[in-house]
Amino acid sequence: MDSLRINERLEQLRAVDVRSIDKNDLIDLNQVTIDETKPVPERVTEFMRQIQNPYCFRIGDVAIKVVYKENGPSFQQNMIDMLQTV
């Protein structure tokens, strides 16, 4: 998938209103497993495959909506930073 399509897809995922969906349809972050021995790009790919929407998921019974600051670090940078700590 080219970067334009990836950005469009991420924008669609970001726009999901967590209040309008059944939280049981969201992926539970507790069920996501990442192989810490793999390089960061592979961990990012695996996380994205499992979580399906990195902006909207759940932890147990709580629906989570992730929002990033407009002028803050990019989604990609935040994802890399997070996965480097796993």
Image (cartoon, helix red, strand yellow):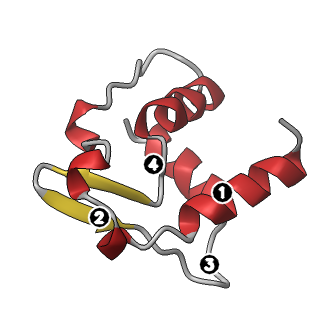
Tell me which label, 3 or 2, sits earlier in the chain: 2
Q: Cα distance, mark 1 to mark 4?
A: 18 Å
Would you say the residues marked 1 and 3 are in contact, meaning their CB atoms lie under 8 Å apart? no
Q: Quadrant of residue 56?
A: bottom left
Q: Is residue 42 above or below residue 66?
A: above
Q: Name the residue carrying label 4.
A: 82
Dot 2, how many residues are within 10 Å of its Cα: few (below 14), some (14-19), or many (20+)? some
Q: Name the residue carrying label 2.
A: 64
Would you say the residues marked 3 and 2 are in contact, meaning their CB atoms lie under 8 Å apart? no
User: Can you give x and y, in whole percent of width and height, for residue 22 in the image?
Assistant: 26, 58
- Residue 10's disc is 1
Would you say the residues marked 4 and 3 are in contact, meaning their CB atoms lie under 8 Å apart? no
Q: Name the residue carrying label 3.
A: 72
Q: Secondary structure at mark 2?
A: strand
Task: Using the image as rendered, state which of residue 60 and residue 21 is in the foreground.
Answer: 21
Q: Secondary structure at mark 3?
A: loop
Three-letter amino acid code of the residue under disc 2: Ile
Q: Cα distance, mark 1 to mark 2?
A: 16 Å
Tell me the mark number nearer the camera, choosing from 4 and 2. 2
Three-letter amino acid code of the residue under disc 4: Met
Dot 3, how many residues are within 10 Å of its Cα: few (below 14), some (14-19), or many (20+)? few
User: Can you give x and y, in whole percent of width and height, for residue 20 in the image?
Assistant: 35, 72
User: Can you give x and y, in whole percent of width and height, for residue 83 in the image?
Assistant: 47, 40
Q: Is residue 15 above or below residue 56?
A: below
Q: Secondary structure at mark 1?
A: helix
User: Can you give x and y, in whole percent of width and height, for residue 66 in the image?
Assistant: 42, 68
Q: Which residue is located at x 45 percent, y 48 percent?
A: 82
Three-letter amino acid code of the residue under disc 1: Leu
Tell me which label, 4 or 2, sits earlier in the chain: 2
